Amino acid sequence: MRIHVKISLNGLTLSYDGVIMYPDSSLAPSCHMPAKGIETKPGHIMVFAWVDRLMPIFCAPAFFCGRIIFLEDKMYHLKTEAHFDSAHFLAGYNGKCANIHGHSWKIEAEISGSELQQAGEKRGMLIDFGDFKKAVRGLADSFDHTLIYEKGSLKAATLAALKDEGFSITEVDFRPTAENLSRHFYDMLTAQGLPVSRITVYETPENCAYYEGE
């Protein structure tokens, strides 16, 4: 059976496209299924996937024809954080969060890579912490002390009145949940060329959402 499997190994994504041999064809997984991989030795992995339960679907090259593409594990990780205070509301929500309310938000940004810089003043660094902190701090500052609102969720007259009063308002193309903000901040930092691996956004000290890229 020919399938394509995306495998998560050490937080990275591997791709397998080939034929898996099954003694019992009823155990064959469906196409494009997620799986978990554990490297047992170079060139050999044990891959687990959900069939009716989590179970191994192949182990070692002798069990399949095809190609495993290994991505080098990203060994170095940097993390920094920045804070901002802002208000938002969730249009169409049946609850208190439909009203304008504020949070002391925290952004935790993580980057990763397998290679350190080998020459110059940044030798031995993944990137300069100063550059990393500046990018995350600039992102937080752009959302500080403002009303974050979803495009189309406020009447034109309301927007005009807020602007006329000189209030800071920030329009986004998505519902401003912690989940969507984590993805938005991930995309913004990635666009700056940072090797972002995860963005976590805290609404409160106890509650957060995070987004990880592939």
Image (cartoon, helix red, strand yellow):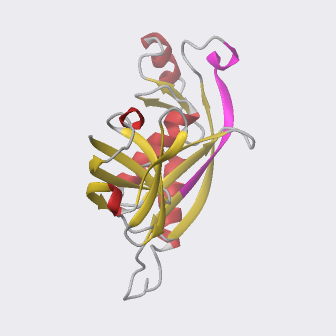
Residue 77 vertical placement versus 185 (above, below): below
Q: Is residue 214 visible?
A: no
x and y, in percent, of residue 95 in the image: 68, 13
Q: Is residue 87 left or right of residue 119?
A: right
Instruction: Give whichever of 173, 24 is nearer the camera.
Output: 24
* Res 206 quadrant in image: top right
* Res 3 quadrant in image: top left
- Residue at the limit of the structure toward the right, as seen here: 206
Residue visible at 51% across and 52% down in the picture: 198
Question: Is 186 included in the stretch rendered in magenta?
Answer: no
Residue 193 vertical placement versus 130 (above, below): above
Region in magenta: 95-109
Instruction: Give whichever of 210, 1 is nearer the camera.
Output: 1
Residue visible at 43% across and 61% down in the picture: 45
- Residue at the limit of the structure toward the front, as seen here: 23
Residue 111 vertical placement versus 28 (above, below): below
Question: Is 105 included in the stretch rendered in magenta?
Answer: yes
